[in-house]
């Protein structure tokens, strides 16, 4: 239900106004932030399961980006809570910072989705490489059904002419 409203926001194009703020404010903003947390948790689970097959540089880069996004999630959650508390105290349904919070939440979700896609792509690539390496070793070590062992030929040096 909330998601369909958010989709409606994006179908309006880039027009940001009061309707957008009402759709994402308060509890809805917190639910979006929770979705972002879920995206990051799933991404970290995938990343950790592929740590052994990824290059250490790639794994470290993704880990740093994950920590960066988690920090942003905590900061945005604090903003949402502060704005909600100020709205309750002042009696206004929408706090002054809501427009900024909406942009932060939407931007954060977009960044998390891109991050997740990058993690999935890198993990698939690492997994494919691992499977390829395994199959190559398997074929080298497995005897042929006819009793012939397959041995890869070494690269032959090119003849040199004087």
Image: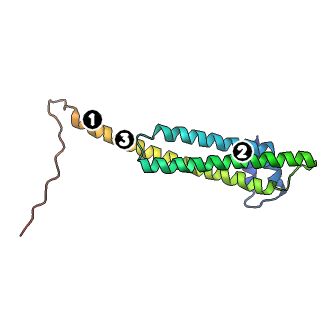
- The one nearer the camera, 86 or 116, is 86
CA–CA distance between discs 1 and 3? 12 Å
Q: Is residue 102 above or below residue 138?
A: below
Dot 2: element: helix
Colour mode of the rendering: rainbow
Q: Which residue is mark 2?
A: 32
Image coordinates of residue 9 in percent, x first then y, are 75, 53
- The one nearer the camera, 103 or 149, is 103
Q: Which quadrant of the figure contains the C terminus?
A: bottom left
Q: Which quadrant of the figure contains the N terminus?
A: top right
Quadrant hosting residue 43:
top right
Image coordinates of residue 111 in percent, x first then y, are 62, 52
Drawn side of residue 43 relative to residue 13, left or right = left
- The one nearer the camera, 33 or 81, is 81
Residue at 56% in and 46% down = 116
**Of callouts 2 and 1, which one flags the residue occurring earlier in the amino acid sequence?**
2
Residue at 63% in and 39% down = 38
**Of callouts 3 and 2, which one flags the residue occurring earlier in the amino acid sequence?**
2
Q: Which residue is mark 3?
A: 130
Quick check: marks 2 and 1 in contact, CB under 8 Å? no
Drawn side of residue 143 relative to residue 26, left or right = left
Dot 1: element: helix
CA–CA distance between discs 2 and 1? 46 Å
Quadrant hosting residue 30:
top right
Image coordinates of residue 44 in percent, x first then y, are 55, 41
Q: Is residue 95 above or below residue 123?
A: below
Residue at 61% in and 42% down = 39
Image coordinates of residue 19 in percent, x first then y, are 83, 54
Q: Which residue is mark 1?
A: 138
Q: Label 1 crowding class (10 Å Cα cut-off): few <14, some 14-19, many 20+?
A: few
Drawn side of residue 22 relative to residue 111, left or right = right
């Amino acid at each position: 239900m909330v998601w369909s409203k958010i989709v409606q926001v994006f179908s309006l194009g880039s027009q940001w106004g009061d309707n957008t703020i009402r759709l994402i404010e308060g509890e809805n903003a917190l639910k979006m932030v929770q979705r972002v947390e879920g995206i990051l948790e799933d991404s970290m689970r995938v990343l950790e399961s592929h740590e052994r097959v990824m290059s250490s540089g790639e794994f470290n880069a993704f880990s740093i980006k994950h920590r960066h996004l988690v920090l942003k999630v905590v900061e945005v959650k604090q903003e949402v809570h502060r704005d909600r508390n100020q709205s309750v105290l002042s009696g206004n349904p929408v706090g002054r910072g809501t427009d900024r919070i909406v942009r932060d939440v939407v931007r954060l979700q977009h960044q998390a989705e891109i991050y997740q896609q990058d993690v999935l792509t890198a993990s698939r690539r690492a997994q494919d490489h691992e499977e390829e390496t395994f199959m190559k070793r398997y074929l080298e070590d497995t005897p042929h059904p006819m009793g012939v062992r397959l041995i890869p030929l070494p690269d032959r040096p090119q003849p040199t002419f004087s």
